Amino acid sequence: MALAKSLPTFNEANTVFYLPASHDPWGVMTSLVIATFASYVALDLAKRVCAQDRGVALNWWIGGSIAMGTGIWCMHFVGMLAFSLPIALGYTYALTVASWIAGIAVSAVALHVASSGSLTWQRLAGGALAMGLGICAMHYTGMAALDMAPGIVWNPLLVACSGLIAVGASAAALLIFFWLRKVNDKQGRMYQGIAALVMGCAICGMHYTAMAAASFPSGAICLSVNALAGNSLGALIALSSLALLAMTLFTSTHDARMQSKTALLASSLKVANAQLQTVNGELQRRAFMDPLTGLPNRVLFEDRLMHSLRRVDRAAESVAQRNAEKIAVLFVDLDGFKTVNDSLGHAVGDEVLKEASLRLRVAARDSDTVARIGGDEFVLLMEDVGSMADCVTLARRLIEVLARPFDIGGRRVEISGSVGIVTYPDHGEKDKLVAHADAAMYEAKRAGGNNYALFESHMDAGALEQLSMQNDLRHAVELGQLQLYYQPKIDGRLGQIRGVEALLRWNHPEHGIVSPGVFIPIAERFGLINSLGNWVINEACRQMQAWARDGLRMRMAINLSAHQLRQDELVERIEQALTRNHIAPSQLLCEITESVAMKDIKATQRAFEGLARIGVYLSIDDFGTGYSSLSYLRQLPARQLKIDRSFVGDVEESGDARAIVSAVIQLAHALGLRVVAEGVETVGQRDILVGLGCDELQGFYFAKPMTADTLQAWADGRKPANAVDFSPSVMHDNLTI
């Protein structure tokens, strides 16, 4: 079946006859499919050439122009092959290739315009005109590939119409390119398909309008009949073009997905980087700022001090020494703060610290650095100091603001401050400024507090000694200088050993045995107390295992500090030490002083419950010296109360002391707790305590603290000096728990 050409077969005016023309409907349909598919691919390629990477965009522009141009040209060529005359037709090679090149050029122009940032009316008009002329050039060059004799006769009106259709279709294509950019991906595919169909119909409309403009005189022959021709050639070109377009579309779609994933990953990475910057900022803030008060911490203070010292040294080299710049360090310690913590608790103490830090910042100059370096200790760095009078003026202002009453939750809290002052370069070595200011502060505190003191050389001796002790204490564990001494606890009714208390001693190579009253405050002040406490836990468990190998099972009590109670891993650390040394948890008893237990009841309760859960026994030490709350005491899973030696020492002479001890014993027994009295030094004290029902006794009357070897010898029946004589058999019978 053939579609007859609508033009007349002769010209009535000149009586010229034309050959009848027809089109194969399947060829026409194939050309429409190719035109629509090529348009769909072209719309997809328009998005790829907008890539931000110039290299990627250029590659897509070149490859896309070839694929898109080949598709449009293929539609044209298939449409021409669908055209037939009563004579055989063929197409010259050169002009056919030229028409293909024209199709690629048209596509290049279209994709170039589509890749621009915006579509102005000038750009639309210029692009549509260039594309229209290119399409016309492609079509009419392809028609010229028919080498006819005589030549083709053209209808000027239809030729003009085909040109207008080409320009209009190009303008519509450019508008669609830019419009589809605003459509989201979900709706984009549907709109892209509709737009491609419209563009395909427009391209076919132009092609077949141009074909209708051509007439072939009767008797004309095709001189290129032996060139490109045949239905097989059309089918091959159509399939090849469709395959090329399909491959291009697949590549474009895959690239779009990859770009989408890349964009998503880039967005996620951007968000992650933003979060990382926030985290880094927070970590940096925490690394250099005190979390409670918001002031700079020791690290940041020392960094600023170091920079100030360098600036002072450089200034001293460039000007006369008498005019050299000076800096000052003021060390501030709160007088009476420990009492606030002990009596009102840490929550109130924290509020006092925050208010004190705010007052110090307000009192200091804008150029000064105020830092909290630990506990209730603050330091101020004064730069551009004119004279010592400036430092004294600031110190007095600091003392004044700290002496004003604090209103904390309706409570009136009164403290004061002691300030030590040191200047550089007047007061010695720059690496000792903080230590010297600290020494001056202690001088002000010894004078009664609420005062300031200027550093003097004689103060350096105490500071150096404390610094030396601190440095030595840092290495005491690794050098094996720490040692546990053991003091027996005696059953008050049976007169037999119930266990021992482990007491830490420091065997200093120069100073000999150092009392805990000397080095424990240093350890607490310089952050060494936790490492010492951990050593005590491990050594106590190791010693119990060593005694067990020699047939001596002994319950041992160790002391826990307030710092250890705040350690989240305390219970786990004790459990690991017990397991590692194969010690039953009931053999270990942890003693916590009453003031420590009650100052942070939540931390105490958490630690007590954890230790009780693993089977460790618990004791409240120095009972009666703090501010015990019976409601809290009842909630703690303690097994023992220990009466402070201050009551025991007066029990023989003071009726009040005996009444207090008797009340404590009765209270403890009512709560199901055993009672231990420490500091028993006379037989009279022993008899009174036993008569009041005290369960266990401990003190010099029975034995002084002794080494592990001495205690082992005592267990074997060899009494140490100044110890009560116990029968070895009785003692051995009672050592098993």
Image (tube, rainbow, N blue to C red):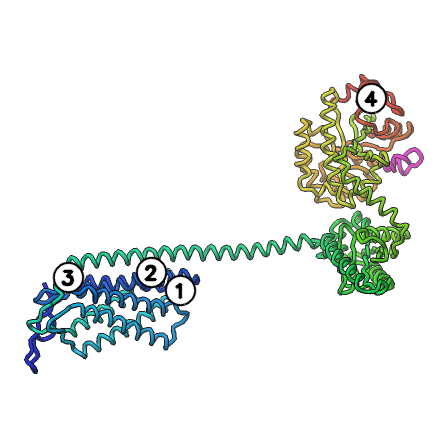
CB-based contact (under 8 Å), mark 1 and mark 3 = no
Say which of marks 1 and 3 sits in front: 3
Sequence order check: which comes first, mark 1 or mark 4? Answer: 1
Say which of marks 3 and 4 sits in front: 3
Q: Which residues are magenta?
A: 645-661
The image quarter in which residue 707 lies: top right
Image position of 699 (left or right of 9): right
Percent position of residue 556, x then y: 76, 29
Amino acid on which the number 3 mark rests in the picture: Ala
Amino acid on which the number 2 mark rests in the picture: Gly
Sequence order check: which comes first, mark 2 or mark 4? Answer: 2
Relative depth, front residue between 717 and 618: 717
Image position of 697 (left or right of 549): right
Percent position of residue 585, x then y: 69, 30
The kind of secondary structure element at disc 4 is helix
How packed mark 1 is, by other alpha carbons closer than 10 Å (few <14, some 14-19, many 20 or more), is many
Q: Residue at label 3?
A: 229
Give how far apart the Cα atoms at labels 1 and 4 are: 93 Å
Amino acid on which the number 1 mark rests in the picture: Cys
Give how far apart the Cα atoms at labels 1 and 2 are: 14 Å
Q: Residue at label 4?
A: 714
Q: Is residue 19 visible?
A: yes
Q: Residue at label 2?
A: 63
Sequence order check: which comes first, mark 1 or mark 2? Answer: 1
